[in-house]
């Protein structure tokens, strides 16, 4: 059977409207969007033009951000303005931010006054903040309303709101008084007062908080949507569960990239330009090269010991590699635990003392594993040096790996910067100094 | 201000019911649950006993799994059975799986026949499968019903269902015919037929699929809940967005641990026993020690070259470390892209050729960075050897790092096993052979 993309590719030859639409119609918008995303911007724009305005706005939302901007740049002013007014408020604001100045200026006149203000406001929040992923398409009701009136109002507003399953009760200053779910509304008596049935223990997030924090709160409280408030405690938007889930995945991807000393990529790894991929990788690699030069300097310092006992060199990669591995383990565990909130900075001392025991046990086991080989290769003295070095290096590297994320956190840097390569490089330097330092003092005895 | 836990600790001295409840009552169940989770099982059980059965069942659900089993083991048969019958079906099944045989046998007689069968069925799906995170508390309606009847039915069932916002239309054999959202129901005319308004392009998942896949589908299609079906295409459960979000976070944590060669921890890193932490870390460390012995063997092979040119050793950690770093970068990018579905195995060739260009550029830049230092340290020949080695090692390691996740995937292993430490160890061996191989052939010319 042909895949959607293959069928489409065939239809594309003539860009036959009927045929392409028939092929795509049976599929979920998310899949059609992904398929369109596989084409270049020019073809994607032609494909989108085959759909009704409403469908087009929905499909458009499934294109990756960088592609949205490219496709939008190809559209006429009227088409783009029409698309804009049908998009969800939060997605519209994201796209607006990705457009260049001339396209922004092109769009604004085509929008209604209220939309224009909403767009400017939503687009003003910095990337990564709760404000940047919130939407203004939420439903509000008043505390003095009856349940019947609230349901009637929701029915009227339903088509334009991102969710009607969670409604927000506000006062005339838009201060958030409480929330009511649609489930609670349809279970309540139609004559009940909203004030009597609303929940007042509302979990909300400030508009300047990080989206990572907001998403974590949504997950912790199992929320469908979380209200976002400003300095005056006024309701300014909501973050829905689906955007929170996207934020969680995005954060995990960023952390995975940082954990390997790669800068955060704006596009997926198969689409990002080679230049960008090079740029995001070379920064740390070069920095680590200079870090690794300290290992070389350490070795130079012990040149005499090494030239008289070349057998020591056999165990160098093994020892410094083991330190790097154990340190990377400890760092990765801490980075993730800090990211999910399982531990915080107050836990460092406890975790450090635990790591002393575990690190010593790990180093001890590994020392046993290499001891006899080292004796066989270089005699009892070398065996002893390698075994003791292994314990000290693994323990020291584990403690460095565990502490580095906390240190970065203290200096308001992302703990994820304590990547495997960074920890390994530090462990290399420590390992060289420990190993040859120990060797030169034991062998000169 | 005192934290919840501190206040509680004070109240705890007398276990004063009124006081503790007053302190906790104003807080969200999720927070009260987290607070209780900070105590030992014995105190947690006493605290839970202060709440009504319904509250207790809700609070209990917020305790971490390993703690639930400990607390349950302390309860009397009747109390445990009562708690069981109030818990959500999916959480009940998870707890059942965590209990030992004697406690399981204790509970079953206390449950109604239907509950017992439901529990046995839900508990039978293997961990990690869609079946293991689905719930049987979903609402179903019939295609021949009118909208008004469906709403009436939902209102009746609302208190017992995990969600009523998404309803499933089934035939007498429980075959899934379509879905209707509550939004669509309240927007439709009360006299409309369900068959006429239901969506038939339903995205569902098979009960044996991985929960990772199910969660990714829920995210991709922005679903509130996804139906789960069996071999006969019959509806057997639903997975809700909140469980999907938990699954996404859990998978990301597992991948983060694997990326640093740590086995998957069952508990959080601050609670897991030291023995378990040791066990989950030592496996890969020892395996990598044996891997690293190949580096030692490689060095032994070039012993003569090394003893006549000790300056070569200065650059060893730098070169093999750089290879490990570049390889780790490539591996981490691929592991994450495979996990999120951004790339699949068919993309390998394209990505490999891209990596050849990027890897060569990275290696070239790093070679320039070290060349003059190497000339200064060991003369022009050594400078040349180090620079050429850098290019070859970084390129080779990048290609190994990129390919390893695909190779593991091909052999049905988790690509995340291609961890930084594993890649670094392989890169070490490759680096030693490339560096000294090149050195001995150039220097003996």
Image: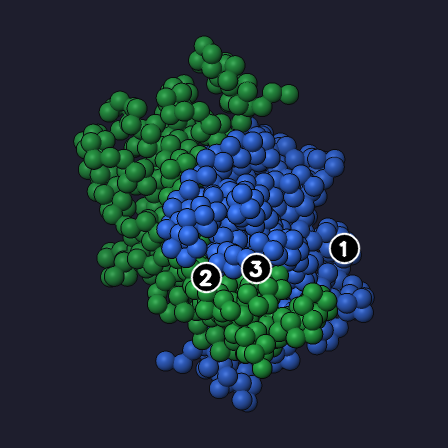
Chain colours: A blue, B green
Q: Quick one: SS at disc 3? A: helix
Q: Do badges 3 and 2 share one subunit?
A: no
User: Is residue A111 found left or right of A202 in the rendered image?
Assistant: right
Q: Residue at x 33, y 29 (%)?
A: B70
Q: Position of residue B363 (x, y in %)?
A: 62, 71
Report if the CB atoms under discs 1 and 3 are less than 8 Å apart.
Answer: no
Q: CA distance from mark 3 to mark 2?
A: 17 Å
Q: Residue at x 48, y 86 (%)?
A: A10
User: Is residue A428 found left or right of B255 in the rendered image?
Assistant: right
Identify residue for label 2: B296
Identify residue for label 1: A120
Label 2: chain?
B
Q: CA distance from mark 1 to mark 2?
A: 62 Å
Mark 1 or mark 3: whose residue is earlier in sequence: 1
Q: Nearer the viewer, residue B64 or A429?
A: A429
Q: Residue at x 38, y 40 (%)?
A: B276
Q: State which mark lies toward you, 1 or 3.
A: 3
Look at the picture and state if B258 lies above or below A102: above
Identify residue for label 3: A307
Q: Position of residue A70 (x, y in %)?
A: 68, 72
Report if the CB atoms under discs 1 and 2 are less than 8 Å apart.
Answer: no
Residue at the farthest bottom position: A14
């Amino acid at each position: 059977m042909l895949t959607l993309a293959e069928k489409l590719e065939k239809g594309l030859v003539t860009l036959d409207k009927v045929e392409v639409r028939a092929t795509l119609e049976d599929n979920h918008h998310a899949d059609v969007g992904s398929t369109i995303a596989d084409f270049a911007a020019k073809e994607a724009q032609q494909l989108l033009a085959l759909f009704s305005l409403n469908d087009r706005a929905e499909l458009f939302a499934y294109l990756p951000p960088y592609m949205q901007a490219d496709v939008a740049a190809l559209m006429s002013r009227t088409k783009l303005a029409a698309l804009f007014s049908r998009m969800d408020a939060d997605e519209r604001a994201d796209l607006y931010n990705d457009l260049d100045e001339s396209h922004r200026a092109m769009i604004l006149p085509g929008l209604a006054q209220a939309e224009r203000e909403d767009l400017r406001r939503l687009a003003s929040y910095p990337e990564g903040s709760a404000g940047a992923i919130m939407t203004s398409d939420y439903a509000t009701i008043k505390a003095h309303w009856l349940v019947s009136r609230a349901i009637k109002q929701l029915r009227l507003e339903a088509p334009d709101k991102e969710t009607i399953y969670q409604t927000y009760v506000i006062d005339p200053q838009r201060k958030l008084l409480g929330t009511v779910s649609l489930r609670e509304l349809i279970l309540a008596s139609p004559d009940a007062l909203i004030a009597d049935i609303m929940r007042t223990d509302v979990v909300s997030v400030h508009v300047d908080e990080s989206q990572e924090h907001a998403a974590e709160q949504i997950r912790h409280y199992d929320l469908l949507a979380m209200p976002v408030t400003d300095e005056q405690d006024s309701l300014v938007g909501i973050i829905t569960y689906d955007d929170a889930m996207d934020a969680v995945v995005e954060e995990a991807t960023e952390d995975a990239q940082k954990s390997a000393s790669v800068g955060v990529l704006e596009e997926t790894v198969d689409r990002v330009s080679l230049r960008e991929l090079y740029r995001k990788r070379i920064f740390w690699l070069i920095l680590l090269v200079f870090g690794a030069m300290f290992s070389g300097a350490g070795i130079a310092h012990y040149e005499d010991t090494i030239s008289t006992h070349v057998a020591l060199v056999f165990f160098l990669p093994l020892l410094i590699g083991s330190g790097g591995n154990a340190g990377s383990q400890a760092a990765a565990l801490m980075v993730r635990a800090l990211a999910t909130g399982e531990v915080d900075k107050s836990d460092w001392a406890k975790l450090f003392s635990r790591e002393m025991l575990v690190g010593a046990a790990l180093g001890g086991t590994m020392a046993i594993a290499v001891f006899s080989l080292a004796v066989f290769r270089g005699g009892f003295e070398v065996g002893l040096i390698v075994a003791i070095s292994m314990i000290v290096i693994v323990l020291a590297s584990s403690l460095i790996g565990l502490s580095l994320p906390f240190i970065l956190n203290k200096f308001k840097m992302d703990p994820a910067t304590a990547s495997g390569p960074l920890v390994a490089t530090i462990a290399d330097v420590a390992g060289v100094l420990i190993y040859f330092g120990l060797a030169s003092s034991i062998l000169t005895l």
